Amino acid sequence: MTRSKRNFESPIILQGFAADLSAANHVISSAVEVWPSSARLKRLALTALHYTSADVQDFEFLLCYKAHACLGVAVWEPENVSFISDNSSVALLHGLYVDQQHQGQGVGKLLLDEVHLRAEKRNFSGIYVRAERFSASYFEHVGYRQLADNQGPGAANSPYPYRFLGDLAARQSNAA
């Protein structure tokens, strides 16, 4: 039975594989459709944001399903440490996308929580994000802190002004 035929009453997070790329890219297209930018920019962005089978080798895909629908996708790099400081390593969250019809319903948080759990199991101390301007407030809302210009991987040369760090140790102490 394929994932699209499963019938879950509540959302469930599953690890994605090459066969899931179509569902993941569909969610990405839906999410990008509501970005506050021009149609041309959205069209150009999709070329860079859609994943291919080659990406499955480098990234871990997590998909949120409910009933037969893929509601969201989180993509992160568990094998590529973004930076190390004070004996701690930080992983890169490559993308977090929620289908436009399911935004604001906790899907992104479910996916992010799963990334955090998996990162903690691999002894990462944090998650690094290069966010779009319009998603910066989301990452602040879920407890990530914006990095200063001189902080984080490649800070001096970073073209990303909206860079965030989710501190997994702080997350654990808040949960206690």
Image (tube, rainbow, N blue to C red):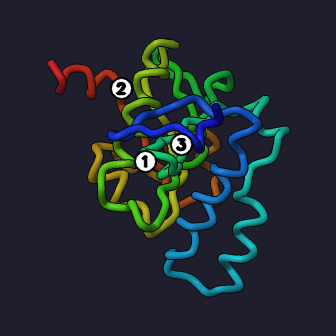
Quarter assignment of residue 62:
top right
Q: Nearer the viewer, mark 2 or mark 1?
A: 2
Query: Residue at position x 67%, y 22% from top?
Result: 79
In this rendering, position of residue 109 left or right of residue 14: left
SS class of the residue under badge 2? helix
Q: Quadrant of residue 44?
A: bottom right
Asked if the residue under mark 3 is in contact with the one under mark 2, i.e. CB atoms within 8 Å, the reply is no
Inspect the image, locate mark 3, and give the three-letter code of the amino acid beneath it. Answer: Ala
Residue 13 as seen in the image, left or right of residue 16: left
Which residue position is annotated with label 2?
A: 168
Whole-angstrom CA distance, mark 3 to mark 1, is 21 Å
Determine the CA span between mark 2 and mark 3.
Answer: 17 Å
Q: Select label 3 or label 1 by which is in front.
A: 3
Looking at the rendered structure, the kind of residue marked 2 is Leu
Mark found first going from the N terminus, 2 or 3: 3
Q: Residue at x 70, y 58 (%)?
A: 49
Q: Residue furthest left?
A: 176
| Mark count | 3
- Where is residue 98 shown, x and y percent of the image? 47, 56
The residue drawn where x is 46% and y is 17% is 86
Judge from the rendering whether residue 3 lies leftward or rightward of residue 111; answer left or right: right
Q: Position of residue 97 (x, y in %)?
A: 52, 54
